[in-house]
Amino acid sequence: MKKLTITRPDDWHLHVRSGAILKTVIPYTARQFARAIIMPNLKPAVTTVAHALAYREEILQAVPETVCFNPLMTLYLTASTTIAEIKKAAASEHVHAFKLYPAGATTNSDSGVADIKSVYPLFAALEKYDMPLLIHGEVTDANCDIFDRERVFIDTILTDIVSAFPELRMVVEHVTTTEAVQFVQSAGSKIAATITPQHLMYNRNVILAGGIRPHYYCLPIIKREHHRLALIAAAISGNAKFFLGTDSAPHLSSLKETACGCAGCFSAHAALELYAEIFEQANALDKLEAFASFYGPDFYRLPRNSGAVTLEKITWKVPAVYGENGIAITPLKAGEKLSWKIQ
Ligand code: NCD
Ligand code: ZN
């Protein structure tokens, strides 16, 4: 196959930051995706509809005029979130979900929730107003092995949430394990999951291949090969519960290449191309369109996009860094070759 045309896709999990980094990264998402779920872990976190709408304006200002892009906003759930704010969010055409970060689980999650049971009344309100809950599914117990944190979250926290709130729509974000795939498959129709390119492409060896490689460090951390194979099987299965969410999470290279580097992989520069490569290697290019363009909007109850994007089979080399004027962001596959390119 030399060309592949699919319905214009959406990215259901994206970090774009603000200010100069936002201006650097947003054009890459906007040229391939019609919409993206914008994660709210700014500093300070986006906890109100007013803040989300102001942030949305900042994003729109940074989108090149030649493209049409709709940022789908989310609010950061905290112990101080009010039911009135949930009601307001549900009534807003621009706010599409709430994000749950266990406190301390990942980048800018200090205002996350420490005691999940204490926010059950908020989950009840989300269920009542039919607002999806997007979940960073990892326990934060320092004594729990970092490679087990997703599985333990499912066993000790997520299973309870799902049975307590059977009508609550939930996305288990960036699933990384066989256990998470099985959990989502066997849960009811309200439960879905996003899968990132890095978790489909790599196993944990990549982080320590011949030295310590900070650009492969993200959270949840990349797992063993058998988990990667389970994620591939889920992504190409045609099961509508699994859809595209890059978790592209730009950090300045200087903040990753340091004694205590930030978590997050920047993949927006080539997101769809990366997924195309993965699906082709799995002999499943015919399954890419539904994963990238249909199952996400169906879950969020939004219309599927009407436009199309075409990928061409052309080898190109990913730049070593993106950005200028003091911004340098190392992308996934920096300096390596990719075999698909967006026209
Ligand atoms: C994300 C970030 O940098 O905002 N980092 C990451 O490793 N994925 C936060 C997140 O989604 O966990
Ligand atoms: Zn994320």
Image (tube, rainbow, N blue to C red):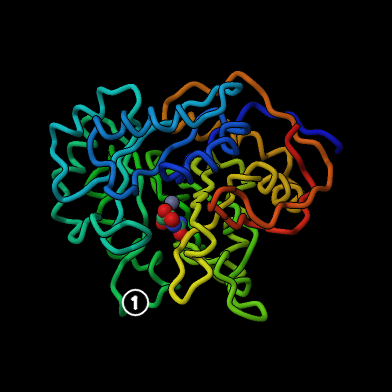
Residue 292 is left or right of residue 117, and the answer is: right
Picture quadrant of residue 260: bottom left
Q: In which quarter of the image is the C terminus?
A: top right
Determine the secondary structure under disc 1.
Answer: loop
Q: Residue furthest right?
A: 2
**Residue 279: x percent and y percent?**
70, 47
Q: Quadrant of the N terminus?
A: top right
Q: Is residue 183 visible?
A: no
Residue that label 1 marks: 144
Q: Nearer the viewer, residue 228 or 219?
A: 219
Q: Which residue lies furthest to the top in this view?
A: 306
Q: Can residue 113 be seen in this view?
A: yes
**Residue 159: x percent and y percent?**
30, 56
Q: In this view, does 188 lie above or below 306?
A: below
For badge 1, the amino acid type reads: Cys
> Which residue is at a point 61% across and 34% down the rendered structure image?
290
Picture quadrant of residue 340: top right
> Which residue is at a point 38% across and 69% down the rendered structure image?
149
Residue 47 is left or right of residue 14, and the answer is: left
Residue 196 is left or right of residue 169, and the answer is: right
**Residue 249: x percent and y percent?**
49, 52
Q: Nearer the viewer, residue 126 or 248?
A: 248
For disc 1, the neighbor class at 10 Å (few under 14, some 14 to 19, many from 20) is few
